[in-house]
Image (spheres, rainbow, N blue to C red):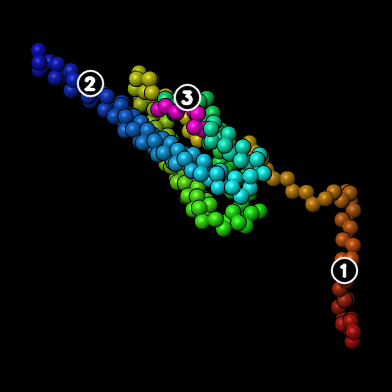
Amino acid sequence: MRARMLAVLGLAVLLLSGCGYNQIQINDEQVNAAWSEVLNQYKRRADLVPNLVAIVQGYAAHERQVLTEVTQARASVAGMKVTPELINDPEAFAKFQRAQADLSGALSRLLLVAESYPNLKADANFRDLQAQVEGTENRITVARNRYIKAVQEFNTTVRVFPNNLTAMLFGYKPKANFAVEDEKAISAPPVINFGQPPAAGRPAPAPQGAPQPYPQTYPQPGAPAPGR
C-alpha cells in the first residue's frame, strides 16, 4: 500500500515537472519579489513628500496650487489598498499606476517651483530631500524594469504549450504589467510644418533679404571664361 502511494506521488511529480508546474512556481516567486521592491521604492518616495512640502511651504507658501496637488496625490497613493492580488487584477493595477503617475507629475512641478526661489534652492535640507527624491525616482525605474522583465517571463511561461494547460488547471493567469504612459501619443508620427506648401508648379519664394541664387549658366566650349 505504501509502495503504491509512493509510486503515485512519484508519477505525479514527474507529470507536474514535465508540464511546467515547477517553472510556473519559480517565475511566480520572481514576480512577487520584483513587485515587493516596486512597492518598497514607491513607499520610500511617498514618505519623503511631507517633509519636502513643509520646506517648500516655508519659502513659497503662496504656491498653494502646486502644494495642494502634491499633497492630494500623495494622499491618493497612501490611501490605496495594495495587496498581492493587485497584480492579478488589470483594472486595479491600472488605477495604481495612474495614482503613482499623478504623484510623479505633482512632484516634478513642486521641484520646479524651487527654480524661482533662490533661498529655497540654497536650503541644505531642501537640497538633501531633492537628492533623495531624485535617487528614489531612479530606484523606482530600476525596480519597475525588473518587474516588467519578471512578468514577461511569467506570462510567457503560462501561455506556451503545454504549460498553459497546467496554468489553466491551477488557475494561473497572465499578470498585469506596467505600460508606457500615453502610448497612443508616443506612437503617433510627428507633424513637421514649416509653413504653407508652395502652389503646384511654383517654386517656393525666397525669404525676404535672402541672396538670390546665380543663374546656372555654363560657357560654351571654346568660349573665354568670364572676366577674361
Residue bearing mark 2: 12
Structural distance between the alpha carbons of marks 2 and 3: 31 Å
Q: Residue at x 90, y 53 (%)?
A: 202
Read off the residue under disc 1: 211
Separation (CA) of disc 1 from disc 3? 65 Å
Residue lying furthest front in this view? Answer: 58
Seen at 35% across and 18% down, the residue is 169
Residue 131, can we see it?
A: no
Location of the N terminus by quadrant is top left
User: In the image, which disc is placed on residue 163?
Assistant: none
Q: Secondary structure at mark 1?
A: loop
- CB of mark 2 within 8 Å of CB of mark 3? no
Nearest the eye: 72 or 227 = 72
Query: Would residue 83 be counted in the magenta stretch?
Result: yes
Left or right side of 60 for 31: left
Residue at the image point whose x is 41% and y is 38% from the top: 40
Query: What segment is highlighted magenta in the picture?
Result: 77-84
Q: Secondary structure at mark 2?
A: helix
Q: Could you tell me which secondary element the residue under label 3 belongs to?
A: loop
The location of residue 31, given as percent across then percent down, is 38, 34
Q: Mark 3 = which residue?
A: 89
Main secondary structure of the magenta stretch: loop
In the rendered structure, which amino acid carries the disc numbered 2? Answer: Ala
Q: If you read the primary sequence from the N terminus, does the residue marked by circle 2 or circle 1 appear first?
A: 2
User: Nearer the viewer's eye, disc 2 or disc 3?
Assistant: 3
- What amino acid is found at the position of numbered circle 3 in the picture? Asp
Amino acid marked by disc 1: Pro
Q: Which is nearer the N-term, disc 1 or disc 3?
A: 3
Q: Quadrant of the C terminus?
A: bottom right
